[in-house]
Amino acid sequence: MNVTFKLYATLAAHLPPEARRSRQVAVEVADGMTVQGMIERFRVPPELCTLVLVNGHFIAREAFVGTVLAEGDVLAIWPPVGGG
């Protein structure tokens, strides 16, 4: 099945080089792929996954393992925001 994986700000460095400018990549994954599985597949440090959305719906950290992706889903992740 196909999903879209989006990584924002500094996390975009974990995408393939050709996808970094657009900050997203279409990915073919096996049925049963979870949010946690995608984070691991792209070697994104879990502690930097501050805001995680699947199709615009917030996914809490404790739900990463149990949230199974479906065909056409969009998984978007943002790191902590700094400033002040």
Image (cartoon, rainbow, N blue to C red):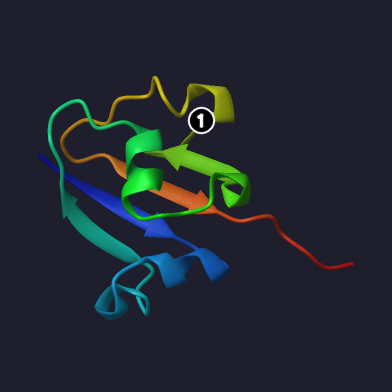
Where residue 9 sits: x, y (%)?
A: 55, 68
The single residue placed furthest to the right in the displayed view is 84
Quadrant of the frame with the N terminus: top left
**Residue 78 found in image quarter:** bottom right
Q: Which residue is at a point 38% across and 35% down the rendered structure image?
A: 35
Q: Is residue 24 left or right of residue 77?
A: left
Where residue 53 sits: x, y (%)?
A: 47, 40
Quadrant of the frame with the C terminus: bottom right
- Relative to 54, residue 17 above or below: below
Q: Is residue 55 left or right of residue 61?
A: left
Q: Is residue 30 left or right of residue 34?
A: left
Secondary structure of the residue carrying numbered label 1: loop
The single residue placed furthest to the top in the displayed view is 66
Q: Which residue is at a point 38% across and 57% down the rendered structure image?
A: 6
Query: For mark 1, what is the residue?
Result: 59
Q: Residues within 10 Å of mark 1 (few under 14, many from 20)?
A: some
Q: How many marks?
A: 1
Q: Which residue is at a point 50% across and 64% down the rendered structure image?
A: 11
Q: Is residue 66 left or right of residue 31?
A: right
Task: Identify the amino acid type marked 1.
Answer: Ile
Q: Which residue is at a point 39% across and 19% down the rendered structure image?
A: 66
- Relative to 11, residue 33 above or below: above
Where residue 57 sits: x, y (%)?
A: 47, 33
